Amino acid sequence: MVERLRRWWIRFGLAAVAALLALGLGWWMRQSGGALIADLFGLAAAPFVYAGPTPTQKRDDRASQMQGRLEALYYENRELRSLLELEEKLDLKTITAQVIGRSADHWWQGMVVNRGGEDGVKVGSSVLSDGGAVVGQVSEVSARTSRVLLLSDPGSQVGVMAVRPRLMGILQGRRREQATVEFFEQQPLKPGELIVTSGLSSRFPAGLPVGRVVGFDKNQAVPRVKITFLAPIGRLEWVKIYPGEPAVKIEPPPPPPPPPVAEPVSPQPAASAPTGATTVKPAPPTPSAPAEVTIAKPKAAVPPASTPLVPKLKPSPAPEPEGQTPPTFPLKPAASPRLLTPETDTAPGGTPKPAVPRPSEAPAPSTTPESIPAEAPAPPPASSTPAGEGAVSPENRNGAPTDATLSAPPMH
Amino acid sequence: MQPSLLRQCINAIGTLVSAVCALLALFAPVPGWAIAGIGVDWPLIWLICFSIRRAPLPAGIAGLAMGWAQDGLTIARPTHALGLALAAVLTARLEKQRFIQEDFISVALITFAMAVLSETCIAVQYSLMGVLPLAEIWSHHQSVALGSALISSLWAPIVYMPLRWWWREPVPLK
């Protein structure tokens, strides 16, 4: 018996060990996701790293993708402005990776990139083209490489949205540069419509451009739309990986600005005003304006800063008549910002130009009602000279930070 | 006559390295290695070269191991192991050295047939899984099987020649 075993071992021992080894290796590779091979390939491919697409090609791709992204953001922005403030926060730490390999079989649409776990890539990270269009998702990570499942793989389904009609649908890859989207509602889409990832997709951050509609098939029970990807999925060279979880945060609207308190210091109310306004660009009016308000009437503050404010101010000057009540004025600066806010909303629509003609009289009005009083002070030539000089003196004061107080003094 | 132990070890290492090279080549995006977007099936070519003068059992084992390794590089379901093992066993059963003489041509022919077979195995598995519409699977199968068979059979002789040289004294397992 032992002798037979021994003979068997001499004859087949090595072969048996080799077979076991081969099977073990194969199984281990399967379990480890082929990490060894992928990393080896990364090493082997290193010397042949491609220099990158030609500049013009890159620029073209990027331009078209940027345009798509811009469009997406524009519509999204417009939508959101009227609702809550929804902020999409992508982790800005992106990892730039180079595509070093293609799919390892004919059925699976993927690629290999040269960044892996050591660089912070995680399974599930979103992968974008360098223009910002979605490309796929990291499906497997090894130390120095990772594998990306492309959107064109039939196995990757992504929630998407047609930007303009706000239609939700599901995108499914078709192994080509084109994919199909099944929408939940039946509504014809025009070719060229932009498709972005929807907020319903838990796999990608919302609002990233995906593709454009190229065809519409009405004969299906479920409306099915053909799209082409914005990113050149077939010839990607560089990609960006967002390692962070897709995070879409809905934040409560900012608290209303605190009720204006009669404070002599104008800058504070000014600051609050813009926040309340939210929609309008806060930058231009802001703090500088109030300060100038009282003073600037004649000319100085005029051109840039005051322009947006001016239109609003004008209405306020109308009530001027009372202008002569000096004691109230100091308080008004605080109130004025509040007035401004609603107006600021209108302001963008309003023509900035009209402001220009007025500036001579109204520039100071930036703080509104005060402008009038300011004019008023001129008549009471407390100072040596009439209006003109009065104007000058306030300006000098403008140089000084305290304004509310300034407004008062001329009155006196 | 058993070759020496050292000799056998070197043989085995060489075989392993060539198999790893076949797997590595899968990833390489070399322009001439694809036809209509369908690349060469290097593991299949290696497997056929390996099986052509061996017994069905070791060929099947090699096919299984190679298939699992390729699973690791792509996705595990459906598995590549089934198709590759089947192709390897069939190739070994052909007993080529007994019936066919022309090396180059016959290797290309066998590769052509086996590429179709292994792609069909995957397509059948996809059909059984039922995640994709049947029509789509089989229309894709048409193009993939044909493309893969063409391009793989063109490249097969180039892999076969050095490997045959390496295995020029095949271990008589039978």
Image (cartoon, rainbow, N blue to C red):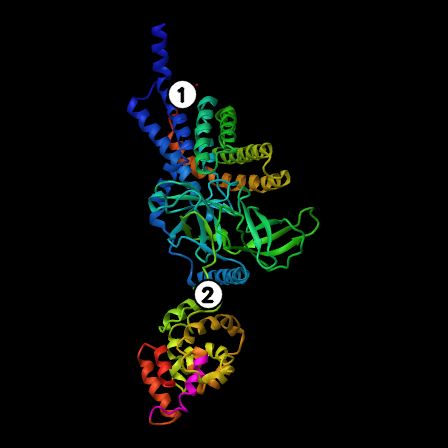
The answer to whether A266 is drawn above or below residue A221 in the figure is below
Residue A53 can be seen, yes or no: yes
Q: Farthest residue toward the top?
A: A1
The residue type indicated by label 1 comes to: Pro
Q: Residue A143 is drawn in which quadrant?
A: top left
The residue type indicated by label 2 comes to: Gly
Look at mark 1 in the image and give the residue it sits on.
B172
Mark toward the viewer: 1 or 2: 2
Magenta highlight range: A369-383
Q: Nearer the viewer, residue A222 or B41?
A: A222
Q: Nearer the viewer, residue A47 or A117?
A: A117
Residue A60 picture location, percent across and down = 48, 63
Look at mark 2 in the image and give the residue it sits on.
A276
Subunit ID for the residue under disc 1? B
The answer to whether A252 is drawn above or below residue B87 in the figure is below
Residue A104 picture location, percent across and down = 46, 41
